[in-house]
Image (spheres, grey):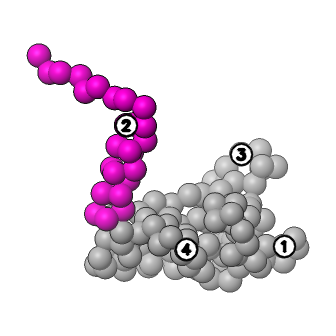
Amino acid sequence: MAKTPDFGPGDLGRLFTQRHAEAVRDLGRFNLAVFGKTGAGKSTLINAVFGHEVAATGTGPPITAGLQFHEHPDGILGLYDSQGFETGHGGDAVLAGLEHIVTASRSEPVERQIHAAWYLVRWSDRRFEDA
């Protein structure tokens, strides 16, 4: 029968720190693409993740143009902030650009690939739209 390891005060924290350091060493930087409609809060979310303003925000006309890359100062997180898109108003071009970056990143070292994507929905939208 396998023995359950004994953990003393602080052991769990040290184990977590050790495993986290190993994961960072093996992966390098984790890259996340954030996209959604204009005004959904993509840049605001990115600023919240970083804890300070790295992406310009505003109300009214779109602020972000194309895809902007932001790297966290500790180097373990990279975020792609995308231009907002609306059905029939450049959304296809934004999605094509994102698809190109994701596809092109597959041939790069793992720390330069896009590992996940978040799609933001405005809180006031009652439902998803048809594709």
The stretch of residues the image draws in magenta is: 1-26
Instruction: Assess disc 3: are there few (<14), some (14-19) or many (≥20) residues with their C-alpha within 10 Å of its C-alpha.
Output: few
| Label 4, label 2: how far apart the Cα atoms are | 28 Å
x 44%, y 79%: residue: 100
- For label 4, the SS is loop
Report the amino acid beneath label 1.
Gly
Looking at the rendered image, the disc whose residue lies closer to the viewer, 3 or 4, is: 4
In the image, which is nearer the foreground, mark 4 or mark 1? 4
Q: Residue 11 carries which label?
A: 2
Q: Alpha-carbon distance for marks 4 and 1? A: 24 Å
Q: Is mark 2 on a helix, strand or loop?
A: helix
If you read the primary sequence from the N terminus, does the residue marked by circle 3 or circle 4 appear first? 4
Q: In which quarter of the image is residue 48?
A: bottom right
What distance separates the C-alpha of mark 1 from that of mark 2? Answer: 45 Å
Furthest residue in direction left, as rendered = 1
> Label 3: which residue?
127
Judge left or right: residue 103 versus residue 93: left
* Amino acid on which the number 2 mark rests in the picture: Asp
